[in-house]
């Protein structure tokens, strides 16, 4: 079983809709969770971090964490074509400060 | 502020040649990570350093790969000899580590390596 799992997609949503991206992780000791956005041919860009159970909002982005279910999600409200990218979930497994990345979910926002 | 700087941005070489990738971390960041990204394997951690000391090199694929961090401002990843299967995008990322688990990593632009 992979340590961090994401649906590869592509996830297609119409412009203006809510995009929901999901991630599960296997290590119960995981301490911190991050979402990165990666445009084609570019490097990963940090968009959200979350450390405690519950929701964290930043503009159109909301990260949700449920440690009991080992589940973290990213909601993008009012999706725009410029949100079309691959979204990578990253987890600190609780030892050292390294991150384990999921394979990413491709998001396509159609105008 | 300058972000993570990597050079070269693109490298094309022939099998058997030595390749050296370079990274300059964000000023004040004391942890540095080398990643490799391919379509097949995604983003993989190769090695990381804290305060210039290698902490975890379990992701280094084989002895052909080596990494150094001689000072807080510079790191290299070397492949000798290179092979076609080493073709990938290599990223350097850095963070300011406070000793906990809540360290946000920032990525450089990457080096696209092609080994013919």
Image (spheres, coloured by chain):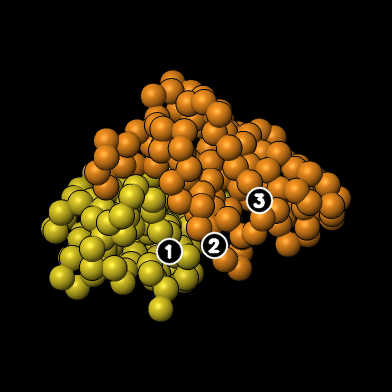
Chain colours: A yellow, B orange
The residue indicated by pointer 2 is: B42
Front one among B46 and A7: B46
Pointer 2 with pointer 3, Cβ within 8 A: no
Give the letter of the chain under mark 3.
B
Which is in the foreground here, disc 2 or disc 3?
A: 3
Q: Give the distance between the C-alpha atoms of the residues marked 1 and 2, in whole angstroms.
A: 8 Å
At x 73% / y 62%, what residue is drawn? B85
Front one among B92 and B74: B74
Pointer 1 with pointer 2, Cβ within 8 A: yes
Numbered mark located on residue A102 in the image: 1
At x 77% / y 52%, what residue is drawn? B82
Residue B73 coordinates in the image, percent (x, y): 51, 25
Give the letter of the chain under mark 1.
A
- Circle 1 SS class: loop
Give the letter of the chain under mark 2.
B
Numbered mark located on residue B65 in the image: 3
At x 29% / y 68%, what residue is drawn? A27
The crowding category of the residue bearing disc 2, from other C-alpha atoms within 10 Å (few below 14, some 14 to 19, many at least 20), is some
Q: Earlier in the sequence, mark 2 or mark 3?
A: 2
Residue A111 visible here: no
The reply to the same-chain question for discs 3 and 1 is no
């Amino acid at each position: 079983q992979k340590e961090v799992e994401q649906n590869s997609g592509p996830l297609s949503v119409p412009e203006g809709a809510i995009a929901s991206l999901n991630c599960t992780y296997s290590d119960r000791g995981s301490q911190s969770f991050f979402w990165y956005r990666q445009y084609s041919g570019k490097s990963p860009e940090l968009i959200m971090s979350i450390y405690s159970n519950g929701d964290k909002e930043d503009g159109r982005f909301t990260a949700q964490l449920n440690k009991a279910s080992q589940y973290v999600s990213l909601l993008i409200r009012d999706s725009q074509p410029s949100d079309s990218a691959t979204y990578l979930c990253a987890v600190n497994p609780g030892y050292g400060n390294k991150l384990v990345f999921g394979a990413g979910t491709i998001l396509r926002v159609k105008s | 502020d300058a972000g993570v700087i990597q050079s070269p941005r693109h490298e094309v070489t022939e099998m058997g040649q030595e390749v050296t990738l370079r990274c300059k971390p964000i000023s004040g960041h004391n942890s540095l990570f080398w990643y490799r990204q391919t379509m097949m394997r995604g983003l993989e951690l190769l090695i990381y350093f804290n305060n210039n000391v290698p902490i975890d090199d379990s992701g280094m694929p084989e002895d052909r790969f080596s990494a150094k961090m001689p000072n807080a401002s510079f790191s290299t990843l070397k492949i000798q000899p290179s092979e076609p299967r080493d073709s990938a995008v290599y990223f350097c990322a850095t963070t300011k580590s406070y000793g906990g688990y809540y360290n946000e990593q920032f990525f450089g632009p990457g080096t696209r390596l092609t080994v013919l």
